[in-house]
Image (spheres, coloured by chain):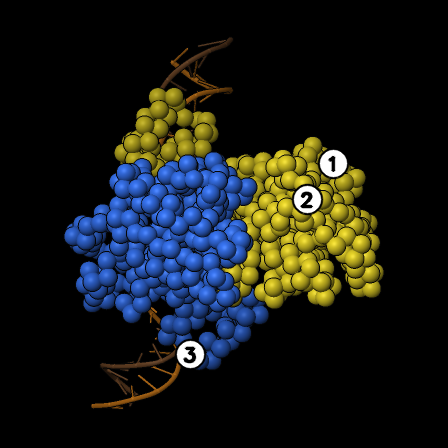
Chain colours: A yellow, B blue, C orange, D brown
Amino acid sequence: MITIKEIAKLANVSPGTVDRVIHNRDGVSEKTADRIKVILKEHNFKVNRIAQSLAMKKKYTIAVLLPHYDEEDSFWKAPLEGIEKAKEEVRSFGVVVETFSFDQKNSSSYIKSFEQLLKTKPQGVVLVPTFKQETRRLTNILLQENIPFVFLNIALSGYGNLSFIGQDSFKSGYLSGKLMQLCLNEGDDILTIHSRSNLSNFNNISQRTKGFDCYFKENGLKNTNHYIEIEDFWDTKKVKVSIEMALKSIPKIRGIFVPNSRSYIIADHINDYRDKVPFLIGFDLTEHNAQALVDDRITFLISQKPFQQGYRAINSLSKFLLYSTPPATEILSSIEIVTKENIPDYRQKEHAIFL
Amino acid sequence: MITIKEIAKLANVSPGTVDRVIHNRDGVSEKTADRIKVILKEHNFKVNRIAQSLAMKKKYTIAVLLPHYDEEDSFWKAPLEGIEKAKEEVRSFGVVVETFSFDQKNSSSYIKSFEQLLKTKPQGVVLVPTFKQETRRLTNILLQENIPFVFLNIALSGYGNLSFIGQDSFKSGYLSGKLMQLCLNEGDDILTIHSRSNLSNFNNISQRTKGFDCYFKENGLKNTNHYIEIEDFWDTKKVKVSIEMALKSIPKIRGIFVPNSRSYIIADHINDYRDKVPFLIGFDLTEHNAQALVDDRITFLISQKPFQQGYRAINSLSKFLLYSTPPATEILSSIEIVTKENIPDYRQKEHAIFL
DNA sequence: CACAGTTCCGTGTGCGCACACGTAAAAATA
DNA sequence: TATTTTTACGTGTGCGCACACGGAACTGTG
């Protein structure tokens, strides 16, 4: 590990001059700059990030705005944990992370939390752009203030975000289609269950559905896909009635597709029909879903590594602030197929990184 | 982020004393130590790892010994890349990583490379314990010299290793069984193809096979599993003859299970039988296998995150050397199901961590 | 030639911490 | 009480780098 000081000695200059060359600051004659550059390359010099961080006294604040989670819909727990993990790690680098949350069903809480967020004077923002119109307003403010921001989980385009961290929803739906087909026989039908109350996450859900249908179309399969829409998944009675109605009127249904993160609720309600409808594919490895998977009430879950997504949002934004290295415009996490047999061990809190 | 100096001021002592308390060094009266401890807790003090690394001038060397890879069997490419990635990151922390490789089929090259490795006077070793007996000799040396070491990819027990980084081979085989069952109908048979030349990796392979069989047994399935053993996968003619013989004599075979990383070779040879034997399950996402997957010649690949495994081997050992935090005795990576539809994007070089 | 302006580069300090060293004060011993 | 030993703590330096400051050497101008 060669140091600036050593390079300086080799080039017969002072460490300060080498530093100037490394950072392309002016004040160095072309001749000596070239000479130093050669030596730097020769010795494969890389700045010691550790020392660099210590020396750069600049502090950064990253503010995060995401939906809060509860017992019933704990999807946002994992991203938050990833964010907390990253928060600890970047602390030593002089990056402070402030988290704000809002109600997914309430756009004004989105706005309000954002206003709180702005008060921290962040140098970077992580946003889950749940509401399209409101997001336009918020991002306009950020653009005006020259605050870089990334989108997490929901991919909106044309908003000037630095990056999107999430999944390819269409592809994950497409994959679900394949898995469903693998389960079914030729004459079997499918039931897709939507939730009206999930408008906020409409983007991902609809892309998943499209991908799912696309798989069957592209492969010339003739299994019919029936749709029902349930207003509110929490209304136990309505859910049960709706499902029973569908299953009774269409006895060919053998598989159920739930393109949101609450397939466990559906699983709860088809216990009586398990023999007739043995296959259920859902999304996201929340605790409830995991339990249903273990209990054989869900066949497949498609997961998107939410912990990593949270972690990477902070990580990539920090890198950008600290070293001006812009992240990829799309950071897509792998689409994981989770079954009862390969469900990850929860005791191992994802993989810890460093520090 | 409160600093030692600030804590010192609050406690009316010098930074040196605070440092002593933090590291449980003696030379501090119990009274003042307690006082300082209270203040540390109150302010939730955490050492700044960055500054700590810079101040600790101790240098560590980690030596790695793994099989080399070639065009045909590139399995070990990914772990090496993970190691290289980690190597870059830990460099700033004063950890140097030296890599050595050996021939999987030649135990004396294993020994020889190890001897080379020892010359670097490593403070930690990453080992792929390919040969049992020889490994005993090597680990005895390491134990004697008090050099901590971890096993990568192959789980041997009772050798005094600090940790094992790899997969649960039995579980991954078990999962393969489930996937196979999902593909097959009741009366279908299975062909499992072993490779004699893979003795070195015998542990993983046999565990996978056991897990595979176990799935069928546990679930009371009656699909017969036929075994053939091919001496050398590279002997194209023999491979073809062996497979054809099996498929012709047992027409009920509809699925093939290849418990090693070279299923693509098998895939190459069953083109003529694709209609009759549509399902092939193999292991490890090497480039060749990935290509076969994309071309629909392989149905499922079970992958084990080899990049992450390499990364974590270095990572956990570094943590141990730097901060004396011992890693989990088993670091098992998730068992990934890879299909044509969710094959990861190779352009995105796994996920970069920090620095 | 004197002067100011510019170009180019060296010096010094501090980031937060670890640790060696030094030194008062307290305790033990003579 | 004088002296040694031990205890308890303060001080100083350096890790590798960024950056502010200052100054020497050079250039141009009257």
Mark 3, chain letter?
B
Residue under the image location 54 percent in, 64 percent down? A346
Q: CA distance from mark 1 to mark 2?
A: 45 Å
Q: Residue at x 37, y 39 (%)?
A: B269
Q: Which residue is mark 2?
A: A223
Compared with B119, A216 (above or below) is above
Q: CA distance from mark 3 to mark 2?
A: 78 Å
Q: Is residue A165 left or right of residue B264?
A: right
Q: Earlier in the sequence, mark 1 or mark 2?
A: 1
Image quadrant for the C terminus of chain A?
bottom left
Residue A294 appears in the picture as rendered: yes
**Relative side of A30 to A164, left or right:** left
Residue mark closest to the camera, 1 vs 2: 2
A24 shown above or below B196: above
Q: Are marks 3 and 1 on the same chain?
A: no
Q: Please state the horizontal and vertical placement of residue B90, each as a whole percent of the image.
A: 38, 50
Residue with the mark numbered 1: A140
Q: Element type at marker 2? A: loop
Binning the other alpha carbons within 10 Å of mark 2 as few (below 14), some (14 to 19) or many (20 upward) gives: some
Front residue of C23/B298: it is B298
Q: CA distance from mark 3 to mark 1?
A: 59 Å
Location of residue A46 with respect to A341 vertically, above or below = above
Identify the mark at residue A272; answer none if there is no mark. none
Give me the residue at 32% from left, 52% from top.
B228
Q: Which quadrant of the structure image shows residue B314? A: bottom left
Q: Nearer the viewer, residue B354 or C23?
A: B354
Which of the labelled discs sits on residue B29, or is there none? 3
The chain holding disc 1 is A
Q: x, y percentage for residue A155?
A: 67, 40
